[in-house]
Amino acid sequence: MKKALITGITGQDGSYLAEFLIQKGYQVHGIVRRNSTLFRSRIDHLHTVDESETSSFLLHYGDSSDGTNIARLIHQIRPDEIYNLAAQSHVRISFDMPIYTVDVDALGTLRLLEILRSIDWPTKFYQASSSEMYGQTTVATQNEETPFHPRSPYACAKVYSHYQTVNYRDSYDMFACSGILFNHESPRRGENFVTRKITKAVAEIKKGLRDTVVLGNLDARRDWGYAPEYIEAMWMMLQQEKPDDYVIATGEAHSVREFLAEAFGCVGLNWEDHVTFDEKFLRPVDVDMLCGDASKAKAKLGWEPRTKFKQLVQLMVDADMAALEQGQ
């Protein structure tokens, strides 16, 4: 049985990846931070009565800022694959918490790479890079060769992690890959991310629980895909003969305004009647448009996105409507 270790397992991507790997026959180990409340709704269904060493799903306390603890866990688990998904991943919040963001998102990756450099068994490493690294690019669609121009503490931290992953791969012959994933959404997306904030508000407005949703920049354009399909690409990268970096994207960009129109249209409402603006939701400096070219992933991995923009919005709205009807 292969073993996989996932940092950031309680997040959207971590939870989908854990499900995917368990279905593939892996034993999945996840690292979770100690909190006073156990908010793990995305992975609660994966727990079994069996919590022995042979269980398919096991959790361990740890934190990307504590390299000693992470090193102990890695030597204890001896994973075949490590997926580094842990991050302070909210771009706007990274402006308010830049030092914490860099410690977890940048130095956290370096701590892992240093640990992997010293182990005595073969382990494959996946680094979660981000389309935000491209920032204010002048290129219409971004691929693996497009220069980075980060425009937030989060993006700067991700660029550092990306280049350190490349550096360790080249310097120490490590099997280390970076997936440059463009925005990917799902019903498990955090409620303070704009897509989920919108679909949750749509459901509540339709049910008469509120009347408005407050947003910032409506003109930003992003390449939005479906998260469960993107975690398949992560796994595919680690199954190749040689490590490499790949852009994962749909190749289509849509504005927040378009997302609003589509989401409110799903329930027969006009978004302009329910959306207000507040500058507190603006970033100090924004990124106008990001749109990915995943040609390399298609050619080398055989990966292609399957869920289109309208389908994505519909399934997110439907999920939030269903959750309200079930009293969640």
Image: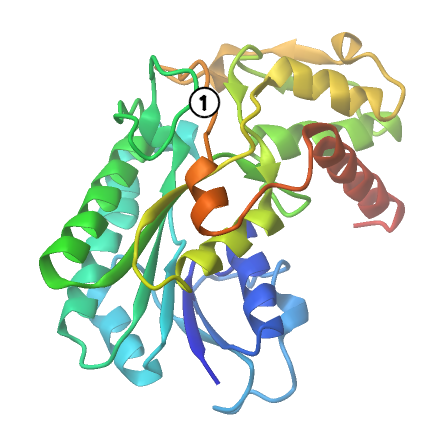
Residue 213's spot in the image, x, y percent? Answer: 69, 20
Q: Residue at x 27, y 58 (%)?
A: 176
Occupied quadrant, residue 247? top left
Residue 303 image point, x, y percent: 54, 48
Q: x, y (%) of residue 96?
A: 34, 29
Left or right position of 312 against 223: right
Asked whether residue 211 appears in the rendered view, the answer is yes
User: Who is closer to the viewer here, 69 or 118?
Assistant: 118
Where disc 1 sits, the SS reads loop
User: Residue 201 lies in what quarter of the image?
Assistant: top right
Name the outermost residue toward the front.
299
Q: Residues within 10 Å of mark 1 (few under 14, many from 20)?
A: many
Query: Can I make out residue 32 in this image?
Result: no
Q: Looking at the image, which residue is at 52% across and 50% down?
A: 302
Structure colour scheme: rainbow
| Left-right relation of 133 to 304 | left
Identify which residue is drawn at 75% across, 34% down. 311
Give the vertical position of 153 relative to 256 (above or below).
Answer: below
Taking 18 as reference, is 313 left or right? right
Q: Is residue 130 left or right of residue 160?
A: right
Q: Look at mark 1 in the image and give the residue it sits on.
A: 290
Q: Which residue sits at x=57%, y=24%?
A: 252
Residue situated furthest left in the rendering: 171
Quarter-wise, where is residue 82 in the image?
bottom left
Query: What amino acid is labelled 1 in the image?
Result: Leu
Residue sitting nearer the eye, 154 or 234: 234
In this rendering, is residue 1 above or below 11? below
Relative to 224, say whether 9 is above or below.
below
Depth check: give the residue in front, 21 or 197: 21
